[in-house]
Image (spheres, rainbow, N blue to C red):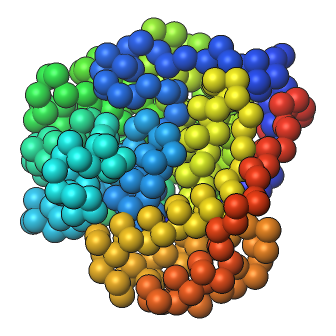
Amino acid sequence: MSVEMEPEGVSRPCLERSIDQIASTTTVDSRIRRLVPGFDAPFFQAGLAGYSDGAMRLVARRYGCPFCVTEALLDRTLINGGKARRKEDPDLIASECGMGDPDENKIAGLDDHPIAGQVMGTLPGEMAQAAALLHGMNYDVIDVNLACPVKKIRKHNRGGHFLAYPDDAIEVLHAVREAVPDDVPCTLKLRRAFDDTSEMAENFYRIFEASYEMGYSWATVHCRTVKQKYIGPGKWDFLRDLVRRYPDRLIFGSGDIWEVHDIFAMLEYCGVHAVSVARGCIGNPWIFRQARQLMQGEPVLEPTISEQREALLHHFDYSMVIHGEQRAGRMMRKFGIKFSHHHPEGEQVRKQFINCSNSRQWRDVIDQYYLESSEETPSSVTDDNSYSGSMA
């Protein structure tokens, strides 16, 4: 998926309280914990096409991520026994990456729960069948993707395409909800509209309202349109107005979460009940630990070189188990580039990771630039609690 991987044109909201004050009073809504035990903090790792596989999720769990969403899994691929039957089965992945025993995996931090299996497709019957398969694979939540803006997805009448066709979207949502037991939460991912026309705005509200009426537990709403893709800033004001319009509903927010302070800024400014962390957590699993540190009133620390080394090695090892050495070597380049941002010699490290294609080269870069040192001390995250500025 081609997306901008750095913040561009993002302005910050004016907040009456500091980020420290906001975080210290932040708790997770009790309805979320009842629906999904273990979802104990108001933030989570989003489903990211081409990124949020089992390896990325397991690393995020090690640093405090309370809930994860898979990348969008195509219904027909699931039905035909493809990718998700092996490479996205959360318990199988944890078993292969760990010791095999579920209890031992949990102790070792290799428990990929709670987790939402995100399904995307076209036909109600196939979407229902795929959702039932995900439930059978022990996913805790079934999430329906009505948001993906990628052109090839829209051409096949999937993802964000449905925001232009509300009747079809509602039919798909109904089929999925009927296929999954009542005690298993179903959720959905939306964008704020297909485009900025008044007709498409009305379509959003039709789909949004219908989902809750048929029993969906929450909607995660990305504050850009489908046409906008990932270009330009999102509209946090839309999320704030949506929450105010529907005060009794669980609504999660998505868009422009680049570092830990953004999580609490969105919670405060928009009033959403949880924040989806997407591009901001690629190569940065520590964002979840930092969020918990803020909530506990502790110093927010950048990862040490030793912690960076540990995360990189774990990520590559998990990727090797899931994808094999050849594919893992290629896939990890894009993660290495993002991880390098935390290193004092970031640009040089980035260039080295770009040239990696196998496990030996990967470990050579790590051994060269991520040597453990007993003298290193964690540094604090730059203080950005004022959040001055205004929303675009």
State which quadrant residue 387 falls in: top right
Residue at x 43%, y 59% (from the top left corner): 56
Front residue (pair 380, 324): 380
Q: Give whichever of 189, 309 is nearer the camera.
A: 309
Count of labels in the image: 0
Quarter of the image where one finds residue 128: top left
**Residue 325's quadrant in the figure?**
bottom left
Q: Quadrant of the C terminus?
A: top right
Residue sitting at the far front: 374
The correct choice, above or below, for 113 with respect to 250 in the image is below
- Identity of the residue furthest to the top in this view: 248
Give the residue at x 84% y 26%.
14
Residue that appears at 55% across and 52% down: 285
Q: Is residue 348 visible?
A: yes
Q: Please determine whether, in this image, residue 220 is positioned above or below residue 87.
A: above
Residue nearer the viewer, 206 or 31: 31
- Residue 201 in the image, given as x and y percentages of width and height: 53, 33
Q: Where does the image place residue 43, in percent across and percent down from the top left?
A: 52, 33
x, y (%) of residue 263? 64, 34
Residue 264 in the image: x percent, y percent?
67, 29
Nearer to us in this view, 356 or 85: 356
- Left or right: 226 with respect to 141? right
Q: What residue do we see at 38% from left, 14% from top?
A: 31
From this viewpoint, is residue 240 visible? no
